[in-house]
Image (spheres, rainbow, N blue to C red):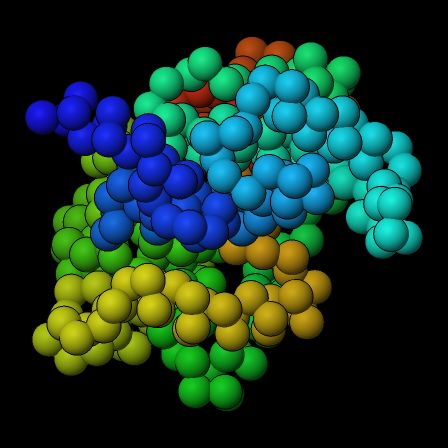
């Protein structure tokens, strides 16, 4: 039955996902990931694929069935040009320069969206070959998320009536949680664990279903403060920061959207920056010295242990990921 449905889709415009290519990509992503799952992933791909849809339209391609390897290679060349200079279209419009990492992300999105539509990998573009340069995930800039700035941002959120957003910010900086983990975390369970053992595990809302006790974090005074504040501002009768009538997607887009603007005004670029601040605290506590972003690396053995710990407490499986938070060698 599924093969018959795919064959039928292949005979329809944009593989049966809609008449407009951009809309069709959106529907294909929903079909691949599920309409209620992986909201952040779907949203990110839907934003990035707009550039590819526009590129296709400029080249006279309005049906995804007509996308071929030559077209996506041309798209790779277009992105490669934008790494070094703005791209100027024949009508005089200019597309701004992009970073290497963003170029890699744009190509990754094209590969994912084409797979979502076609359900094969016949059209696949290597970002490394297309752009001619590998992406570096090693952080080189100083972290802009100290505790003082975090508390200032949270105070402004509270003053604007967004107490739950402030709680998400506190939990992200104190416990290294992602936004989804912060507003879905079972706060009662965490407080019970902290009271009993002095530490608590991050279990709910984890990325990739990594719900395990390996991400257990000792509670310092700041972490207890963040947890107590979240308990105070959560909706009545709820274990987490969402009420029974709240929609997680709406909360993420609306409430946390306001929080992002306040964070930037306080000098904190993003929620991820808050996790980077947490990661730096963990690293410096283990090595008893500065992170690679602040000074030279001392003991290599301690450095390796600290990186493994940082990656684990942030919910990542590979120790190498720590370099994107606290810098490399």
Near-viewer residue (302 or 226): 226
Is residue 42 depicted above or below 266 in this figure?
A: above
Say left or right for 118 vs 301.
left
Residue 81 appears in the rendering: yes
- Whole-percent x, y for residue 100 in the image: 73, 31
Choose top left, top right, bottom left or bottom right for residue 296: top right
Residue 296 sits above or below residue 162 on the image: above
Q: Residue furthest front?
A: 11
Is 1 placed left or right of 204 in the picture?
Answer: left
Question: What x and y, as percent, mark residue 30?
Answer: 31, 45
Q: Residue at x 85, y 45 (%)?
A: 89
Residue at 25% across / 57% down in the picture?
A: 184
Res. 318 image quadrant: top left
Left of 278 or right of it: where is 58?
Answer: right
Residue in the foreground of this view, choosing between 297 and 47: 47
- Residue at x 76% of width, y 16% of height: 132
Image point (65%, 57%), residue name: 269
The quadrant in which residue 215 appears is top left
Image location (x, y in percent) of residue 255: 42, 73
Residue 200 in view here: no
Q: Quadrant of the N terminus?
A: top left
Q: Number of labelled discs?
A: 0
Which quadrant holds the C terminus? top right
Q: Nearer the viewer, residue 228 or 55?
A: 55
Residue 320 rendering spot, x and y as whole percentages: 53, 19
């Amino acid at each position: 039955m599924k093969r018959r449905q795919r064959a039928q889709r292949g005979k329809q415009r944009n593989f049966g996902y809609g008449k407009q290519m951009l809309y069709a990509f959106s529907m294909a992503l929903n079909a691949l990931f599920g309409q209620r799952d992986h909201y952040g992933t779907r949203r990110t791909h839907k934003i990035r694929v707009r550039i590819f849809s526009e590129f296709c339209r400029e080249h006279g391609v309005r049906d995804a069935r007509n996308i071929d390897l030559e077209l996506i290679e041309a798209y790779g060349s277009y992105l490669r040009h934008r790494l070094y200079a703005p791209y100027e279209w024949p009508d005089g419009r200019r597309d701004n320069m992009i970073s290497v990492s963003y170029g890699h992300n744009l190509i990754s999105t094209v590969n994912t969206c084409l797979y979502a539509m076609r359900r094969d990998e016949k059209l696949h573009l290597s970002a490394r070959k297309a752009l001619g340069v590998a992406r570096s995930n090693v952080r080189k800039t100083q972290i802009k998320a100290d505790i003082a700035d975090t508390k200032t941002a949270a105070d402004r959120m509270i003053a604007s009536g967004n107490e739950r957003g402030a709680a998400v910010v506190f939990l992200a900086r104190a416990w290294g949680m992602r936004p989804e983990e912060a507003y879905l975390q079972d706060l009662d369970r965490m407080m019970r664990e902290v009271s009993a053992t002095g530490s608590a595990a991050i279990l709910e809302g984890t990325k990739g279903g990594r719900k395990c006790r390996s991400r257990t974090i000792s509670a310092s005074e700041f972490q207890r403060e963040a947890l107590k504040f979240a308990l105070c501002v959560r909706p009545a009768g709820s274990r987490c920061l969402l009420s029974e009538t709240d929609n997680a997607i709406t909360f993420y887009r609306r409430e946390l959207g306001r929080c992002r603007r306040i964070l930037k005004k306080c000098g904190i670029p993003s929620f991820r920056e808050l996790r980077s601040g947490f990661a730096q605290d963990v690293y410096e506590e283990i090595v008893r010295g500065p992170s690679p972003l602040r000074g030279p690396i001392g003991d290599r053995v301690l450095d390796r242990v600290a990186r493994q710990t940082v990656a684990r407490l942030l919910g990542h499986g590979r120790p190498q990921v720590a370099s994107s938070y606290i810098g490399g060698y």
